Amino acid sequence: MSLLVMLGGVAVFMYGMKQMSLSMEQGAGAGVHKLFKKISKNKVVDYGIGVGATVIVQSSSATSIMTVGLANAGIVDVKNGSGMILGAKVGTTLTAFMFALSGVSKGSFSMSAVFAAFAFVGVMIMYMSSDEKLNKIALFVAGFGMLFAGLELMEFAIGGSDSILSVQLQQVFQYDIMYNPLCLVILGVLFTGIIQSSTAATGLFLIFLMTGVIGSIDQSFFLIMGANIGTCTDGLMASIGANANGKRIALFHLLTSVIGAVFFSIVLVIFRTPIITLFENTFPGNPQWSLATFNLAYNVIYTLILLVFLDPAVNLVKKMVKEGQPQKAKVKYIDDLLLATPMVAIENSFKEVLDMAVLAHENVERAFNGLIKEDMSDSKKIAEVENSIDELTRALASYFIKVSAATSSMGHEKLIGGLHHVISDIERIGDYAVILAKETNYMKQWDAHFMEQTKEELQQIYTKVSEMFFLVLNTFKTRETKKLEKISEMHVEIKELIGATRDVHITRLSSNMYSIEVSKSLYSVLFALERVADHAVNIAFSIRSDTGSKTEAFKNMERDE
């Protein structure tokens, strides 16, 4: 029974981490975007960007996935991305110090219990407030509290050093094999790879230390080095279907993590006694601080060493992953010969953008149908179409720059500026097709399924999104404003349907009709459909607002009347 409670604590912890990271990503998106704008040829700057981005979103996995995506899009090269990956390793060590606070207590006072109460505060704010910004903050607060609630639950389940579960776990870690550095590193890799979170692994290892399950802190050091390797799986998965540069950065992440673990394992084996003595004397009675400090020192030292040798390391991964044949975007209407007559070039660009929008919608539909039917047979096709959309985005963006250079008309410049925003919205719609496909795969792996009622609710939402999308395309094509009001109303209806589905799911979840795995996928699917609708609305309102702003478009329409 104690083991089940401990696993429940792990689940609460991981769910809290997910919610906190999600709120950080949403709320700090602008900050991360500004950081990425500072990408330069200076590897130290790129390293700092990796540190900063990871501190902001509190997820090295998110940073590595973003970096692979940026490399795949041609925004960063392998050297830039590799520097950012090294920085992300350091940025993620902050969480270990946060978790170490769970061991701070005095008498009946527990810092961890105080932080756990934040979950209640966050949830109450979400239930009592309809303010979007406040709810984002509340989501972070609730997630933060759930982290410590999970830690408290794990610690309670394990109990004191003489509890049944604690004794059983201690016996496991007292086997001779559990003092073998290689076995401990491999255990850290496997555990982190399975749960897909080095942060959760770190939290559990800290609890093991504080409850006496792990008798020697050097065991936890080897486990944490394994966790640093295990977290590379997210980047490797993200690189599937990416171009050569995306694959190179994912490989760089894996190789450097392995190199760091091997180097430090050798050092730790040779100088085991003085290193353990140093940490035990520095943090007497607080092994969790020893682990958090080691995690920081380990990542800082080995990443800085690798930063010095970044060029040869990058050259190595370039040799290991050969450059594939460059893909050419299959454009139908745009051609450099049309630049002599900018208006014709712009008109043909509109046609190309419309085709790209249809391509994105078809891919979303393909992915959504696969999700509902629990069918992964179109996953390869979805990835191929997504690559085509990315190539079209790059081709059109490059063409728009050429058109801008070829015209002196302010009117033409405004049209081109608006189209830049539109292709960005279309590209993001295409991205959500991939997210839907990934959720289908995730549910297959966990043998998780949506109830028929949930499928019907999702189908109703998607039907409304699809109906609105075709209205959007017609509006964008004809440039007529008469249907914008209808699009705005449909957008509100979609958000209401999504909100209702979320509310119903909470009821089902509380009635144990759904598992955490299904909840994670459902929220991701609802978020994807909501964002598809948002980006579609931007496309429609771009006919009266360069940025696709609904408010600005309506103001411009009122001014013209």
Image: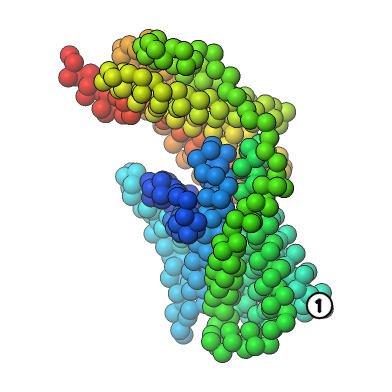
Q: Which of the 4 quarters of the picture holds residue 365?
A: top right
Q: Which residue shows up at 57% across the image and 23% down it?
A: 329
In front: 66, or 165? 66
Q: Which residue shows up at 79% across the image and 75% down it?
A: 180
User: Where is 349 relative to 100, above or below?
Assistant: above
In front: 230, or 394? 394
The number of numbered discs placed on residues in the rendered structure image is: 1
In front: 500, or 83? 83
Residue placed furthest toward the right: 176
In front: 445, or 126? 445
Which residue position is annotated with label 1? 175
Question: As drawn, is 66 to the left or to the right of 161?
Answer: left
User: Where is 218 relative to 3, above or below?
Assistant: below
| Residue 258 screen position, x and y as percent | 69, 62
Q: Which residue shows up at 17% across the image and 19% down it?
A: 559
Residue 359 in view? yes
User: Where is 189 relative to 403, above or below?
Assistant: below
How would you rate the neighbour count of disc 1 (Cα within 10 Å): few for under 14, some for 14-19, many for 20 or more?
A: few
Residue 197 in view? no
Secondary structure found at label 1: loop
Amino acid at the residue labelled 1:
Tyr
| Residue 262 screen position, x and y as percent | 71, 68
| Residue 343 screen position, x and y as percent | 36, 11
